[in-house]
Amino acid sequence: MSSLLLAVLIAVAVVAGIGLIIGLVLAIASIVMAVPSDERVDTVLEMLPGANCGACGYSGCAGYANALVKGEAKPGACTVASDDTNEAIEEYLGVKGEKIRKVAHVHCMGNCDNTSNKADFQGIHSCLSASRYGSGITSCTFGCFGMGDCVNACLSNAITVCNGVAVVDNDKCGGCGLCAKACPRKLITIAPVKEQAVVRCSNHDKGAVAKKSCKAACIGCMKCVKVCEEGAVTVNNFCATIDPQKCTACGKCVENCPCGCITM
């Protein structure tokens, strides 16, 4: 055997030996330093829909599953999961959940009948793209673009664009909030399902200017505030908002709104 071949074999053996030692050290370290895991987390994670939308208030399905097992969260917070899924998690963990169903509300009535186009947009058919086009393409600089970014984001096929404005089907909506995140003008909010009044406008211009840009715009007249006995209605920057937690669905604000932008 030549000295060159012997040198190569020795080098290979040394490298293999070092690799073996490092492998053993890493194997021992992984055992000694391993963080104990609860197999229930993996089981619950498999039960969840895997949308990772964050509507439950946690970073994703894995974070929610970990919180469920630790007792920091209750079944039912996942708005995408079905009733059967929530019941299965309740039975598996032996805890009672609390399902608070929520749906999306679009705060805009700026359809093609109430507003008009002030520009012919030729860019990418996207609300986000259109939002970068100066002050927008419709007469209302606060309204819905109607290009369907919320539709594309919806996991439940609960949103459609009708006559130029987004409309939510409450029966299909899971309240995940992805549509709200996708809307560049933040016209969508998520609220508990209950009989309540909702302001369908987000225009913050003064009354005369708002009315000129949209026939259904809130003019900040304060009539809704004056008739609400629960203090649920406030007007900030010329636009009314309603606190769903305080609203008792008496309907007085709807009856007294001269613009018709408050609905039940």
Image (tube, rainbow, N blue to C red):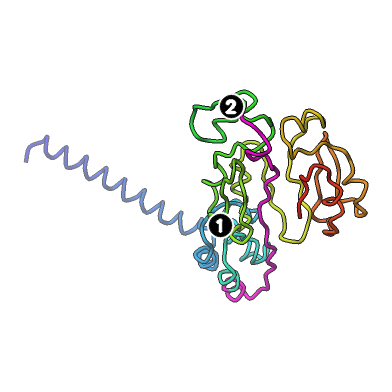
Furthest residue toward front? 113
Relative side of 104 to 252, left or right = left
Q: Is residue 92 magenta?
A: yes
Image coordinates for residue 84, horizontal then vertical, percent: 56, 72
Image coordinates for residue 254, horizontal then vertical, percent: 82, 51
- Vertical placement of 231 versus 212: above or below? below
Q: Secondary structure at mark 2?
A: loop
Say what amino acid the circle numbered 2 marks.
Arg
Image coordinates for residue 119, horizontal then vertical, percent: 58, 25
Quadrant into which the C terminus falls: bottom right
In space, the residues marked 2 and 1 are separated at their CA atoms by 33 Å
Say what amino acid the circle numbered 1 marks.
Cys
Q: Which numbered tag is attached to residue 132? A: 2
Name the residue at 66% across, 73% down.
95
Image coordinates for residue 184, horizontal then vertical, percent: 62, 36
Nearer mark to the viewer, of 2 and 1:
2
Name the residue at 78% across, 57% down.
196
Query: Which range of residues does the magenta coloring cover?
Result: 88-117
Q: Secondary structure at mark 1?
A: helix
Which residue, given by chain and number where applicable, does mark 1 sit on?
A: 61
Q: Nearer the viewer, residue 228 or 72?
A: 228
Compare marks 2 and 1 and give the one earlier in the sequence. 1
Q: Nearer the viewer, residue 263 or 17?
A: 263
